[in-house]
Amino acid sequence: MTFPLLTLSPQQPFWKFRTHRVIANTTESTRNLCKSTLYLFLALATPFIAYRCFNSSTMFWSSSSSSSQPATKIDAESLRRQRINSSKLYQPDASSKVPVIYSSYYDISFLGIEKLHPFDSSKWGRICRFLMSEGYLEKNSIVDPLEASTEDLLVVHTEAYLNSLKNSVNVARITEVPPVAMLPNWLVQMKVLYPFRRQVGGTVLAAKLAKDQGWAINVGGGFHHCSGDRGGGFCAYADISLCIHFAFVRLNISRVMIIDLDAHQGNGHERDFGNDERVYILDMYNPGIYPFDMTARNYINQKVEVMTGTTTDEYLKQLDKALAVAGSNSAPELIVYNAGTDILDGDPLGGLKVSPDGVIQRDEKVFRFARERNIPIVMVTSGGYMKTSARVIANSIINLSKKGLIETNVHSGRKIMI
């Protein structure tokens, strides 16, 4: 764009000439400013535009390729099987160990924040120390599980749910410890969620050990309030659901029974397997306490509601009847036993009045039910909100050993009880 040369005629006033020059200079300055702005914009935007063009073309060719080859598209179930088959959670070698699973990483401890929840988040380590101090367990005989990876967790969990755990506010809601919301998420991942993921690895591995040796106890786990797309009640990952899906694929198991004897309803696994005929759910719980999940209750195959204040004798009578019914209704190839100790008399959340000896008898009845039928059994310790829970669980495991319901042979040829 050019401007004509201005000439001053004798009839043209001088002020008009100056006006033309001001306009010309102003226009030239504006043009230079616009050119500079355009160059700066192009310099900044060109890499972004090039990336978008490349990305668009890639998406176009990818979509064209996928539309022309629909057979290569992986459906959800195939992807689940692929993730399970590529998982490393079955890798730990337990051939020379007893099928008791624990890691020191299970225990949650950080500046005392864990004490703001009634759950004893150090009970897992104390259980093992009780067993070792009384000669029923050796440290080098314990199976140390791997952490469940994101790919492992995606076997059950939605990507949206796992992403929600990257927000500390959501983790605080699930664990019911409000101060967690104020912590940076990297710290929450390390101090709260990592221990949970190790326990998930333990529950998944327990099914393999139970299939090999007849039984297995994960000293942690039992996060029965968590389902594939939601957590709550101190349960961030659905370890029971993951354990069962791994067993379906890797252990060639087609029928599983969940015996959930925690005081609270196991609404997480109920939601995950509500329409799955391969899973039979026996849930014996107090209907007057959390989680009040009426939808999940519709998915329970065998519902046994024990009211607040139920005592030891009445509880054990109802359990005997329930196991007899379960035995006639289902023929499982694996039992997952959620052995919460919040049924203990005095537990602040359970509302029941079962004695420590009653808990020991309960566990013996369930193990005897499984062992007499030659059904592999996985036990997870789940809830329990008193400091005495760890001692009761240890005593129960000792009783199982004394009754010959849990035992193993090691390579040295010695038969040991644990």
Image (spheres, grey):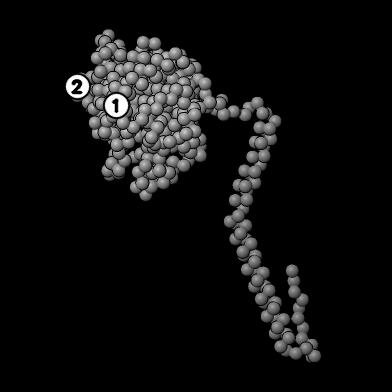
Q: Which mark is residue 294?
A: none
Of the image marks 2 and 1, the number of the one nearer the N terminus: 2
Mark 2 → mark 1, Cα distance in angstroms = 30 Å
Viewer-nearest residue: 281 or 169: 281
* Image quadrant occupied by the C terminus: top left
How far from the left and from the top, in percent, is residue 101? 33, 24
Residue ID at (44%, 13%): 328
Secondary element type, mark 2 = loop
Decide if residue 70 is on the left or right side of residue 395.
right
> Badge 2 is on which residue?
134
Does residue 86 show up?
A: no
* Image quadrant occupied by the N terminus: bottom right
Decide if residue 367 is on the left or right side of residue 12.
left
Residue ID at (65%, 26%): 71
> Badge 1 is on which residue?
311
Does residue 309 show up?
A: yes
Residue ID at (31%, 31%): 309
As drawn, 33 above or below 204: below
As drawn, 178 above or below 128: below
Q: How many residues crowd mark 2 within 10 Å: few (<14), some (14–19), many (20+)?
A: few
Secondary element type, mark 1 = loop
The quarter of the picture where residue 222 lies is: top left
Q: Amino acid at mark 2?
A: Glu
Q: Amino acid at mark 1?
A: Thr
Camera-near label (2 vs 1) is: 1
Decide if residue 177 is on the left or right side of residue 55.
left
